[in-house]
Image: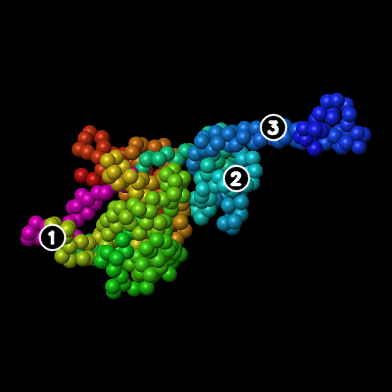
């Protein structure tokens, strides 16, 4: 009616009948209300957009921080511990939903603390709270995997007639150590290739009754890949995915399976079975492969993941939060030794180093931690890692 040309002309010449005039007034009021509503909605839209922009700004400022709280002071259930960690987050977040979305790991077995997405201001507030020992940011590329010639370095290898390595030369020492029988070694690294002959369980007895761990399934890895030698496997990638986005599964397995090869190498170095007539592709460097404790059991904790490096060269990196989760599980699982061939690129304060904090809790439970000191050199000072809580091995 309002947009009828004849109607408009009648209004202009004041010849509009009373009935139509009343209808006109009603429609004018409706139009006014509609305009006011649209104007109000436009304001709301502006406010919504402003809130969204602010949210994006906060999101850009969110980083993963580790909130370390030391030991668990009293006996609590795992759920009670997680609720306590959640209450700390609630004290700096705007809602329970936001706090829940911010949580990355709740360390609740033996290590007390959590990792979460925080702003610098939120991290500062948490660091000032009672019960908090330290709060530190997780940085990408803080740690790198390392490899050393451990047994050669401590003069335990012997060479055959051809000059190639033929095994551990001090058989008496191995006998005294019972070849590491039933010692459970937890290896934090890039995972494992379970089909390797180094992990055969032939002739080995039942899994020790003290073992409480699991064989976690994933891509190309399930419980059938564990045996009486390779008794457990887990993987941790929340920190990796928070930094790099969804896992690049063209260069990684979303499981404990090793794509890099480093974890398989270090695990077999520690406790691989004796394998004769091994060599590189093409028959180079033939000899015998054998770990230092061939009858020890292995538990794998995959904490390092492959990323594209310069010139498309692949490399692996590891994060504080993932390693702390692995330490927390390994200690609770019942390992006797933890081997971690991972080193920071530079020295880190003890209270801000995932490896040192994990080693502290392991040492308090009489678990030996053996870590790498660095692969750099030769040079005057090449050690990149040293501490009082664990043993370090440096490459030549």
| Other-residue count near label 2 (Cα within 10 Å), few / some / many at <14 / 14–19 / ≥20 | many
> Which residue is drawn at the image coordinates 30% and 46% (left, top)?
314
**Residue placed farthest to the right in the image?**
18
Compute the Cα span from label 2 to label 3.
29 Å
Sequence-first disc among 2 and 1: 2
Can residue 330 be seen in the rendering of this structure?
Answer: yes
Q: How many callouts does the rendering have?
A: 3
Residue 85 place in picture, x, y as percent: 58, 47
Residue found at x 49% / y 39%: 63
Q: Secondary structure at mark 3?
A: helix
Q: Quadrant of residue 141?
A: top left
Circle number at residue 283: 1
- In the rendered image of this protein, does residue 324 appear above or below residue 346? below
Q: Report the residue marked by disc 2.
A: 99
Left or right: 92, with 134 as reference point: right
Q: Label 2: state its secondary structure.
A: helix
**Number of other residues with Cα within 10 Å of mark 1, as a class: few under 14, some 14 to 19, many 20 or more:** few
Q: Are marks 2 and 3 in contact (CB under 8 Å)?
A: no
Residue at the top extreme of this rendering: 13
Question: Horizontal and vertical percent for residue 78?
Answer: 57, 57
Which stretch appears magenta? 144-168
Q: Secondary structure at mark 1?
A: loop
Q: Which residue is mark 3?
A: 43
- The image position of residue 396, as x and y in percent, is 20, 44
């Amino acid at each position: 009616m309002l947009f009828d040309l004849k109607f408009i002309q009648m209004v202009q010449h004041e010849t509009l009948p009373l009935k139509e005039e009343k209808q006109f007034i009603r429609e004018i009021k409706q139009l006014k209300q509609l305009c006011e509503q649209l104007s109000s909605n436009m304001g709301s839209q502006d406010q919504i957009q402003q809130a969204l922009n602010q949210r994006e700004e906060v999101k850009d400022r969110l980083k993963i921080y580790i909130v370390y709280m030391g030991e668990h002071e009293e006996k609590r259930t795992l759920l009670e511990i997680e609720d306590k960690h959640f209450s700390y987050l609630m004290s700096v977040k705007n809602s329970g939903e936001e706090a829940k979305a911010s949580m990355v790991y709740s360390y609740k077995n033996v290590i007390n603390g959590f990792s979460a997405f925080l702003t610098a201001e939120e991290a500062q507030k948490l660091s000032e709270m009672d019960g908090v020992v330290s709060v530190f940011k997780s940085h990408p590329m803080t740690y790198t995997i390392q490899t050393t010639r451990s047994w050669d370095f401590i003069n335990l290898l012997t060479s055959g007639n051809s000059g190639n390595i033929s095994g551990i030369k001090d058989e008496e020492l191995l006998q005294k150590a019972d070849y590491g029988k039933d010692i459970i070694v937890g290896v934090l690294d890039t995972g494992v290739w379970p089909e390797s002959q180094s992990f055969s369980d032939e002739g080995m007895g039942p899994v020790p009754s003290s073992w409480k761990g699991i064989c976690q399934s994933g891509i190309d890895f399930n419980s059938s890949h564990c045996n009486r030698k390779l008794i457990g496997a887990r993987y941790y990638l929340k920190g990796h995915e928070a930094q790099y986005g969804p896992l690049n599964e063209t260069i990684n397995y979303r499981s404990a399976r090793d794509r890099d090869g480093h974890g398989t190498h270090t695990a077999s170095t520690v406790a691989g079975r004796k394998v004769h007539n091994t060599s590189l592709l093409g028959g180079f460097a033939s000899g015998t492969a054998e770990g230092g404790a061939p009858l020890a059991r292995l538990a794998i904790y995959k904490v390092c993941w492959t990323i594209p490096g310069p010139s498309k060269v692949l490399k692996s990196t590891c994060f504080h939060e993932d390693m702390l989760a692995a330490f927390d599980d390994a200690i609770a699982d019942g390992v006797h030794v933890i081997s971690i061939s991972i080193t920071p690129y530079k020295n880190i304060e003890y209270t801000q180093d995932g490896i040192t904090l994990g080693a502290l809790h392991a040492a308090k439970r009489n678990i030996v931690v053996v870590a790498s000191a660095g692969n750099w050199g030769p040079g005057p000072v090449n050690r990149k890692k040293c501490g009082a809580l664990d043993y370090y091995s440096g490459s030549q």
